[in-house]
Amino acid sequence: MKASVTVHRDFTIARIDDRLYGAFLEHLGRAVYTGIYEPGHPTADAEGMRGDVVKLVQELNVPLVRYPGGNFVSAYNWEDGIGPREKRPTRLDLAWHTSESNAVGLHEFAHWCQAVGTEMMLAINLGSRGLDDARNFVEYVNGPTGSHWGDLRRANGRAEPFGVKYWCLGNEMDGPWQVGHKTAHEYGRLANEVAKTLRAFDKSLELIVCGSSHSDMKTYPEWERVVLEHTYESVDHISLHMYFRNPAKNTANFLALSEKLDAYIGTVASTIDHVAALKRSKKRVTISFDEWNVWYHSNMQDRAILGGHEGWPHAPRLLEDIYNFEDVLQVGCILNTFIRRSDVVRIACIAQLVNVIAPIMTEPGGPAWRQSIYYPYYFASLYGRGVALKLSVRSPGYDADVADNVPYLDIAGVHDEAANALTLFAVNRHAAETLETTIGLQGFKAVRVLDHKVMTHTDLEAVNSLTAQANVAPKPGFGAEIGDGGMQMRLPPYSYSVIRVSLG
Ligand code: AHR
């Protein structure tokens, strides 16, 4: 099967915001406890943070990490996680029916972020709490000493403000499952008042208001319109979430879901334009897609805990999806979609980072390893920095449940001007046919292949595990030929490929 792509140096989408490769870490299951934090682990530092996990996260070059939730944040008291550990209360976590020891809180998370080399993106509880707690939290984190909250922070060992720039105004407030769920009007008004108050403290904060939890919500996209009408001038980003599932084991439909993602982004972008027009505003709010991933493999096994049949366990195995090779293709398509919509998606966070629906898994007392989906995320973060290119793609397609004529070739291109390199990320959605792909280059001259990796597997359900950590991993690609006007590539059936070339 043949496909062709034309790449033109001047046909650009946007400069990709590095924050597109962010991640999310919630107090949920073993994300924190035995995930990033395990005192006594052979690799743990003096604060109890696992060094093996720090290394794997460093390799991903994650620009920011959203914390501490998620649904967890909507009944969380941030004060429980500061001060001497022995005085911190154990609380019931109402979102996940577990116990929270609060052994890790703001200071410990900040230490971990510093070790990893990433920035904090903090979520504020607007479920069970409100404006005053929000402002106290922000003053504690960023305020000067010589004031009540700054002095308390100093007494807890940190004189310097943490300087956190990114603040989420609640989490999934449109969701009836959320503690403190609100209507769009109730939430929009509260979020606007909180945003105004935080701006009175520091105008330069970047504030993220909740959009829809997913695009099948009954209130979508009216929720976005109403919330933005309340908050348009006081926030910077609107948050969207989407999880991808394939319980019916229908790969064609599953891999077409990135078309639904694209439509979701497009609709919210239009809603932003609509509200901007209503407000006669030249400002453009942008999208923070701060939860995305495949999530369904662990649903059955989680039922007992989530249903409350196991009491209130501390850090149980929850949402531990074991990702397979098919998920590699899906994550490749999702990241390609974000690159192609980088004109409006400025922040995105893979949900989550460690153990809980995550690219990194750990064994308590044992090793940490890369799940299959680690790799497309790794390559996008490594090479997906620069200018997103508007590619002209000709590919045969197929009809799926969510869209017709879904192209078998899903591709994104990034021009890294600083390195004088061009990277293409390509997924072949076809089960049986190789895509013989011609890449026409205009305004570019490819000189040499710098890196070429391919992920394929005979078994879509192949996974990595404690005992087979490299079962699904990238291999060197071959057969890419550079010619006068461009390149020729062979993309195997069901494959993810990344090719980086130097430019003349
Ligand atoms: O990431 C898991 C959960 O998914 C988050 O807590 C919530 O925000 C979303 O529904």
Image: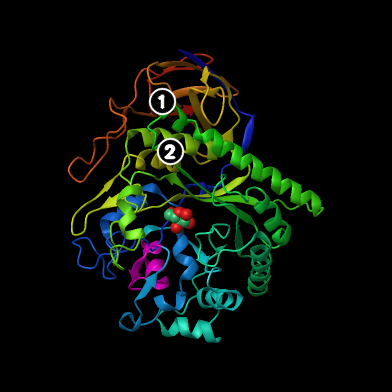
Inspect this view and state whether residue 41 appears.
Answer: yes
Cβ–Cβ under 8 Å for marks 2 and 1: no
Disc 1 packing (10 Å; few <14; some 14–19; many ≥20): some
Q: Which numbered mark, 2 or 1, is in the foreground of this view?
A: 2
Asked if residue 327 lies left or right of residue 199, the reply is left
Examine the rendered structure and indicate whether residue 466 appears above or below residue 333: below
Tell me the number on the disc at residue 449. Answer: 1
Q: Which residues are magenta?
A: 96-115
Which residue corresponds to the image point at 51% horizontal and 35% vertical from the top-left? Answer: 258
Q: Compared to 218, does 396 lie above or below?
A: above
Residue 417 in view (yes/no)? no
Quadrant assignment for ligand 1: bottom left
The type of colouring in the image is rainbow
- Residue 430 placement (x, y as % from top left): 42, 21
User: Could you say whether the residue bearing mark 2 is in a helix, strand or loop?
Assistant: helix
Count of picture labels: 2
SS at badge 1: strand
Separation of marks 2 and 1 at Cα, in angstroms: 24 Å
Image spot of residue 97 (x, y percent): 36, 65
Asked whether 115 or 276 is in front, the reply is 276
Label 1 sits on what residue type?
Val
**Quadrant in which the N terminus is drawn:** top left
Label placed on residue 145: none
Which numbered marker is on residue 331?
A: 2
Left or right, 195 with reference to 57: right
Q: Quadrant of residue 259?
A: top right
Image spot of residue 40 (x, y percent): 19, 67
Task: From this view, report whether residue 64 is shown above or below residue 134.
Answer: above
Taking the view exactly as shown, the residue that stands out farthest to the right is: 280
* Mark 2 closeness class: few <14, some 14–19, many ≥20 residues within 10 Å: many
